[in-house]
Amino acid sequence: MEKKQKMTCEQVREIDMVSYLAKLGYEPAKIRGNDYWYYSPFRDEGTPSFKVNRRINRWYDFGEGKGGSLIDFGIKYNNSTIGEFLALVANDEFPVTKFIQPSNSKEKEAPKIEVLEVKDLTAPGLLTYISKRRIPISIAKQFLKEVTYTNGGKTFYALGFQTDAGGYELRSAHFKGSSSPKFFTHVKNSFDTLCVFEGFMDFLSFITIMKASDMPIDFDFLILNSLSFVTVSIEQMKNYSNVHLYLDNNEPGDRNTEEIKSLIPGAEDKRSLFENYEDINAFLCRPGYSTKLK
C-alpha cells in the first residue's frame, strides 16, 4: 500500500473549518454573515457558544475562552499531538480548500434538525459506539432510543435521549446535537435523593457503576442536558431531601456546583467518585477497568 504523504501545518490551516466540522457531523445552529455559530463540540449546552469566522477561518469557544486554527481545534478535539493530528487529516484525504465568504453575505438560519422516526435501539453502529463508551447494551436500551433525523437536507441516525419537553439529545460516533425543544430530563423513581448530571452519558455511566458494584439504585435523577438549565431546574432540586452533584471536573462544573450549593442547602459535591477524571464516563472508560455487565 502506498504511504500517504504527511501534510504540513500550513496545508492543514488552509482547510475550511466549516466543511471540516460538517464532515465530523457538526452543523451550525445559526449563521450571521461570516460567523457560523455551533453548539460546542466540547460540551453540552443550550446556547451556541462556539463560533467559526469563515472569512479568517478561525474558531473561538466563548464557553472556554479559547480558540485558534483548525490545528488547535484538532489537537483538543482528538486529544492528540500536532503530528498525530496531521497524520489523521492526511489519512482522511480531506480536501485542502479554503472558502472566503463575501463580507456582504445575508444573515440566515441553518436548517433545523427534524426527527423522522424513533424506535428501539438496534443499529449495529450505534450499539458499537455505546459499547466503546463502556455502557452495557442492556442499560442503553433501557434509556435510549434509535432516532432517525434530517440535518442540512441529509438523513442520519443517532442515539436519542428524550428530554422532558419532548426533544432528543442526539449522539453518535461523529455527531453531538439535539432536536427541539431542548430541556432537562427528570427521571422520577419516588426516592428522597436526587442525583444531578450534566449529560446522559454520565448518567448511564453512573447506573453502570452502581449495577457493576451490586449497589442499590435508590435515587431519582436529573440530567441537565446543558448547564444552561441549572437555574430553571433549581425548583426540581428543592423538592428533595438530598441532592448529590456529579457535574464535570472543570471550571464550568466547579462554578455551577457552587451555584447550586448556594441555592440548595445540603446539596453535596460528589465528584470525588471520579477524582482526577473530567467526568464519570471518562472514569468508567479508564484503562484496566471493566465490568461483566452486557
Image: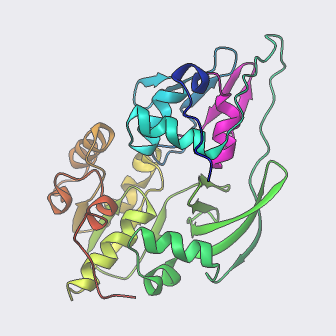
Q: Position of residue 286 (x, y in %)?
A: 26, 63
Residue 163 picture quarter: bottom right
Residue 239 picture quarter: bottom left
Q: Position of residue 250 (x, y in %)?
A: 28, 42
At horizontal 51% and vertical 40% (from top left) the residue drawn is 87
At horizontal 56% and vertical 30% (from top left) the residue drawn is 7
Query: Does any portion of residue 268 appear in the rendered image?
Result: no
Image vertical order of residue 128 relative to residue 258, above or below? below
Please tell me whether residue 38 belongs to the stretch shown in magenta.
Answer: yes
Question: Residue 168 vs residue 245: left or right?
Answer: right
At horizontal 31% and vertical 59% (from top left) the residue drawn is 282
User: What is the tally of numbered marks visible in this picture?
Assistant: 0
Furthest residue in direction front, as rendered: 1
Location of the N terminus by quadrant is bottom right
Query: Does any portion of residue 246 appear in the rendered image?
Result: yes
Q: Which residues are magenta?
A: 14-40
Image vertical order of residue 11 relative to residue 6, above or below? above
Image vertical order of residue 172 relative to residue 86, above or below? below
